[in-house]
Structure formats: C-alpha cells, structure tokens
Amino acid sequence: MAKTADKVIITCAVTGAIHTPTMSEHLPLTPAQIAEQAIAAAEAGAAILHLHARDPVDGRPSADPAVFAQFLEPIKAATDAVINITTGGSTKMTLAERLAPPLRFKPEMASLNMGSMNFSIHPVAEKIKHWKHDWERPYVEGTEDIIFRNTFRDIRHILKDLGEGCGTRFEFECYDVGHLYNLAHFVDAGLVRPPFFIQTIFGILGGIGPDPANVTFMRETANRLFGNDYHWSVLGAGRHQMPLLTHAALQGANVRVGLEDSLYLGRGQMATSNAAQVLKIRRILEELGYEVATPEDARQRLALKGIAHVAF
C-alpha cells in the first residue's frame, strides 16, 4: 500500500491554465502576483509549489520561459519550497511548447499527465455574461472539442529528456484508473523508478468523478500496482476540494490545493488567495492529528535532487 507518514505533504497549484481572469479577481496573472502568492502559500505550509505561467498583459496561459524566469527566481530566493513546473501547460500548446520551461530550468519536480484525455470546463461559459478579455470565452467554450494529448510516445519523451536528462522527478497526474495502468507500463519498462509521487485527480469533466468511493478505488488500484513504492496525493476539483481532501487524508493521503484546482474556499465563498486554501487544509489536517511536512521532508521522501541542482 502507499507509504504513509505522520507528516502530510501539501502541494499548492498557484494559477494553472484552465481558469480565466473573469472567473476570479484573485487569480494571480502577472509574474509578480504569481511570485507573491506562491511565497505566501509556502509560508502558510505548502511544501511543493506547482507552477504555470500567464501572459502578464491579458492572463492567457503562457509557455514562455522568459515569463517563468520572472517568478521562479524570486520564489527560490524567498522560500525553500520545492518548485514543480508544469509539463501540461494548456490544451492549446504543443508538446515542445509545454516542455520549453522545464527543460530550460531543470526543476526538482515537474507534473506529468499520464495519458491523453477530454479535459473540459465548457459548461462554465454558459454562466458568464461579461468577459474581461476577448480570448476567454472561445477558450473556455473550446474545451468541449479539445483533447489534452499525452501519448505513450509523448510520455516516454518527457521521462527520457526531462527525467533522465535533467534529474527531474515527477508528480504523476492520474485523472482516471487507466492512467495508473499507464504509469505501471512505464515502471515495468524501467523508465520510472520509486519512490513515485502519484497525484490522483477527481472531479474534472473527462476524468473520474469526485465520489469518495472512487478515492478508495484509485488508492486500492495503486496499492495493487505499486505496493509500497509510492506516495499518494489527492486533488479534488472545484467545490469538491476540501471535503474530498479531508476524506482522503483520513486514508493516509497527501493533499493538493490552489486556485488552479478551485477558486473557492467554501460554499459560495471565493478564495482570496492560494495561502487561504493552504491555511484551511492545514487547519483541518492539524485538527485531525496530522503534522504538515516541510519542504525538506518532501525532498527526502520523494528523493529529489535538491534546490542547488536546478537551473534558475
């Protein structure tokens, strides 16, 4: 079964690529805003910071390494948190575009979606009447007809070039049970070695649903496939974030929060920052009797190369 520890690793996904500026005035968009919120999240208790970039002019997702550089360096200077750079980028980006930032900066960790999938938030467009920027509506509506692509060849390429080539380890993002079997395929091929950090994701339209029974099912499947060789984390999208994480924590999971995953702090209450979500889940965990892992705890448990070996 998944390795368990008294200390829970909190990952914070600071901005992502799916929510748009109209959806929340608190979503960090500029490099300065991303750095400020990431640093505050680390101070609140996040051991790992999962990072995307945005065009500072209109907030659309960006894969420009020059934009990443503007917030990576300040975050590194202000905190010892593990910096995790996305390889998912956005559904609009090519694989080469998505890999440009992590290959340039060689982070300790990077996310890796374990398969191609429908990934949609198009129903949200029906609820918004006025948009801040012209790109937002077609971007959100367009997710109805977009596939996020990560073929077996794409994943192999990422594991070889970024993993073996740069010493980066991965947050393996599994949106459905088949993704766990995809990961097992690469373990059997010798391209992934323990300890694995498996992020099971619930509540995305196109992935497995946010039912508590599915959390248990994914955990039991991972236990069969990986035994004691993995650390388990759970992400609940949208309104399912806090309830599902609480349920998962009681089963021994690490947790992920952040405005990439949910714009809310509670029912009908917008989150004013990433740190607010970190503080809330930290309070829940501590009231349940758990300790929160430090960045150094996370580095040791996940066998990371250390902040001295990144390229920023």
Image: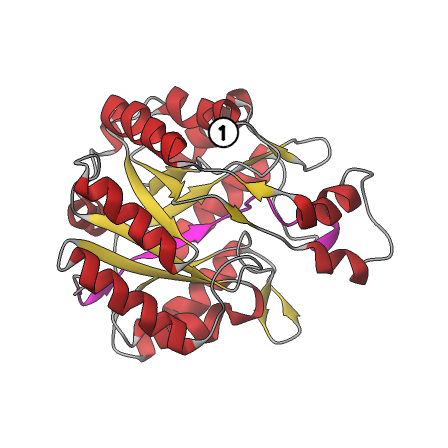
Q: Position of residue 245 (x, y in %)?
A: 40, 70
- Answer with the quarter of the image where residue 193 lies: top left
Considering the image in quadrants, where does the N terminus appear?
A: bottom left
Q: Is residue 212 magenta?
A: no
Q: Residue at x 60, y 65 (%)?
A: 264
**Left or right, residue 303 beside residue 122:** left
Q: Residue at x 39, y 49 (%)?
A: 173
In the image, 62 versus 298, the foreground residue is 62
- Name the kind of residue labelled 1 in the image: Arg
Q: Position of residue 261 (x, y in %)?
A: 53, 56
Above or below: residue 286 compared with residue 72: below
Q: Residue at x 27, y 64 (%)?
A: 221
Asked if residue 81 can be seen in this view, the reply is: no
**Left or right, residue 131 beside residue 85:** right
**Left or right, residue 163 beside residue 92:** left
Q: Residues within 10 Å of mark 1 (few under 14, many from 20)?
A: many
Q: Residue at x 22, y 48 (%)?
A: 196
- Residue matched to label 1: 98
Considering the image in quadrants, where does the C terminus appear?
A: top left
Q: Position of residue 254 (x, y in %)?
A: 30, 62
| Element class at badge 1 | helix
Magenta extent: 4-24
